[in-house]
Amino acid sequence: MSVVNSVIVPAYHEKLNIKPLTTRLFAALGNEGSKTTELIFVDDNSQDGSVEEVEKLKKEGYNVKIIVRTDERGLSSAVLKGFYDAQGEYLVCMDADLQHPPESVPQLLDSLRSHPFVLGTRYAPGVGIDKDWPLHRRVISTTARAMAKPLTTASDPMSGFFGLQKKYLLKANDKDINKQGFKIALELLAKLPLPQDQSIGEIPFSFGVRTEGESKLSGKVIIQYLEQLKELYVFKFGANNLIIFLAVWTLIALFILYKLYQLVF
Ligand SMILES: Nc1nc2c(ncn2[C@@H]2O[C@H](COP(=O)(O)OP(=O)(O)O[C@H]3O[C@H](CO)[C@@H](O)[C@H](O)[C@@H]3O)[C@@H](O)[C@H]2O)c(=O)[nH]1
Ligand SMILES: [Mg+2]
């Protein structure tokens, strides 16, 4: 049977998560779904045994492979590499660290049959973020989400759990897509020529905590996000409105600082 669905997983130093993710994903897909789905890890030369782990799973019969990049690093560019390499018509992106539940993939794939783009969202009734997710990550995530509000109506554009129909990716010019940083879903939502008459699908999921390995979020990734936002604002509203954008955010930042000052003193 030919591959219809491709699940792409950017992975950096994720050896311990590869087996549980693979087995849980294919168990969730069941017999039929497994026959038409491939799983692709895009690893940036971790050299931690991830390659051997994938080879073992392949020998056990799982349709899984690993692409090892030696010339590039970064989450967004790894996801795009996997997307372009994928054979499936329906593409899914999820993290390796099991913060995105593999059991939610079948629902996302179902929704992709009727939507050009589907986002996993943590902001819906009955789901949320694990109580053990650190406070500083919540603050960063909430601020990042607020800053992206004018760019999209999606409830969780910061989500790294999403899917799209490949034909829309192929319609866009690869050079127009910003490959820096972590926020590839936001970038694709803003830049792909998605049909205006079909809505973005959303499926709720609960965001877990990592039990193996460490988060790769860094100061550099935050700066890359701010640069990406600036570019997306210009793309969407034009260069002149960037000044308005900066003015509004300066006022909001001053307001937050003032409130913090009031709290402390
Ligand atoms: N190939 C590759 N993969 C990477 C790189 N950096 C991170 N990854 C992979 O990208 C996934 C997410 O990285 P984490 O380090 O776990 O990110 P996080 O801080 O938990 O952030 C996640 O949560 C955010 C929501 O708050 C998401 O926005 C973000 O995409 C990510 O899913 C993991 O599978 C990780 O191995 C890289 O440079 N190269
Ligand atoms: Mg994570």
Image (tube, grey):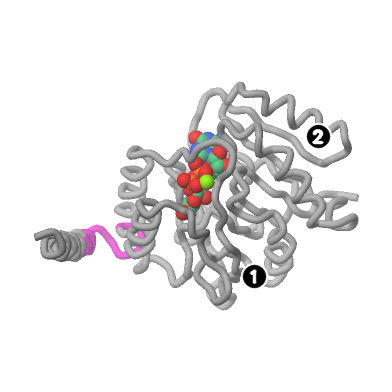
On the image, the x and y values in percent for residue 63 come to: 82, 41
* Left or right of residue 89: residue 13: left
On the image, the x and y values in percent for residue 77 come to: 51, 40
On the image, the x and y values in percent for residue 118 come to: 60, 65
* Left or right of residue 244: residue 231: right
Residue designated by label 1: 115
Residue designated by label 2: 57
Compare residues 55 and 40 and report the one nearer the observer. 55
Residue at horizontal 62 percent and vertical 36 percent from the top: 42
Crowd around label 1: few <14 · some 14–19 · many ≥20 (10 Å): many
145 versus 24 height, above or below: below
Residue type marked 1: His
Compare residues 118 and 232 and report the one nearer the observer. 118
* Left or right of residue 41: residue 121: left
Q: Secondary structure at mark 2?
A: helix
Marks 1 and 2, how far apart at CA: 32 Å
Examine the structure image and report whether residue 240 is included in the region drawn in magenta.
yes
Examine the structure image and report whether residue 78 is included in the region drawn in magenta.
no
Q: Is residue 247 visible?
A: no
Compare residues 187 and 63 and report the one nearer the observer. 63
Residue type marked 2: Leu
Q: How many marks?
A: 2
Q: Which mark is residue 153?
A: none
On the image, the x and y values in percent for residue 73 come to: 49, 31
Q: Secondary structure at mark 1?
A: loop
| Dominant secondary structure of the residues highlighted in magenta in the image | helix
Q: What range of the chain is rendered magenta?
A: 234-245
